[in-house]
Image: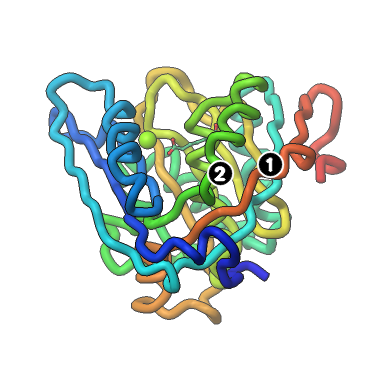
Amino acid sequence: MPFGVLHGNIGAVESWVSARMRARFGGRHVSGAERLVPTPQRQEAVAELMRRCQVDGARIALTLEPIRADSIRKAPALNAATIHVRSVCEGLSLAEAELRERSVSELAARRAVETLTRGRNMRGAALMDAQTGARLDPNREKGVRVSAFDWEPGARERAMEWAQRRGLSFRFIDALALASKAASAPFVTAEIGLSDDPNYLPGYAASRAGGYVRFTQMKRRGDPNGGRVYLIDSALFDAERSVKELQSAPVLIGGLDAEAYMEKHTWHISSANRA
Ligand code: PML
Ligand code: MG
């Protein structure tokens, strides 16, 4: 299942590169993106990452790291849905309910939402025990940044085209790939995420069982708070190994299942029969 062995063309490419871009401006993180590509495509990948950072005068850190083909695992893309909500309050409470439906305790789900909406300048993601709500990340200031992932070759372009036809952007494509890597780790029960861009209002709750569920409003315009919280099954979690896996185990995400995408409006459904 989640971590398959690579076959065909992917396995045949001997050398890969993990390329990561992080940009800061005025002491704040303003942009970040990454690719995992066969070495001959690294030039293109770097050019694309540089196009992502539109802020003049930003301090940009670019990291290129060689990756062995036989260390790359494959994970399926999560099924995705968009729920159109009427207010930020409704978006946040439905996202919290989505976590509850995926075995997260009431306390932990509430704490996850509080951490996300009140935690200024969260750098990486917070790791939280899915039952007790206790923080598990070794360095709470820094959090944990899930990294070293991409769509499998060709799948990003197809996913992008598909998303644009539905008015969705690269943010969705990037966030879905990231959530798919995280969800494929057995110790991740669920996740909740929100952009730190003050003008980007949608957010999501994600899990292996429930897929990637977007809510069109999870913050008010102008609010710079954002981040991610992973709800962790502590019985399967090992502080050192699991954090390393999230941060640096290279994963390629299989193609988006466009047929599995759904859109719903909360004014047509009750939260009880959403799933
Ligand atoms: C989406 O599905 O539209 C993306 C939601 C939040 C993305 C979080 C981020 O930008 O890091
Ligand atoms: Mg961001």
Name which of mark 2 and mark 1 comes first in the sequence: 1
How far is mark 2 from mark 1, CA to CA?
Answer: 8 Å
Mark 1 CB lies closer than 8 A to ligand 1: yes
Residue shown at the point (13%, 34%) measured from the top left: 59
The numbered dot on residue 273 is: none
Asked whether the beta carbons under mark 2 and mark 1 sit within 8 Å of each other, the answer is: yes
**Left or right of 177, for residue 56:** left
Q: Which quadrant of the figure shows ligand 2?
A: top left
Q: Nearer the viewer, residue 67 or 167?
A: 67
Q: Nearer the viewer, residue 108 or 155?
A: 155
Mark 2 CB lies closer than 8 A to ligand 1: yes
Pick the quarter of the image with the N terminus. Answer: bottom right
Camera sees residue 160: yes
Q: Amino acid at mark 1?
A: Ala
Residue 49 occupies which quadrant of the picture?
A: top left
Percent across and percent down for residue 180 are 57, 53
Classify 180 as above or below 243. Answer: above
Task: Judge the density around disc 2: few (<14), some (14-19), many (≥20) Cα neighbours within 10 Å.
Answer: many
Camera sees residue 88: no
Residue shown at the point (34%, 40%) measured from the top left: 45
Percent across and percent down for residue 113 are 51, 45
Number of marks: 2
Residue 253 occupies which quadrant of the picture?
A: bottom right
Percent across and percent down for residue 153 are 51, 48
According to the picture, the residue beneath numbered tag 2 turns out to be 176
Q: Nearer the viewer, residue 149 or 89?
A: 149
**Left or right of 101, for residue 148:** left
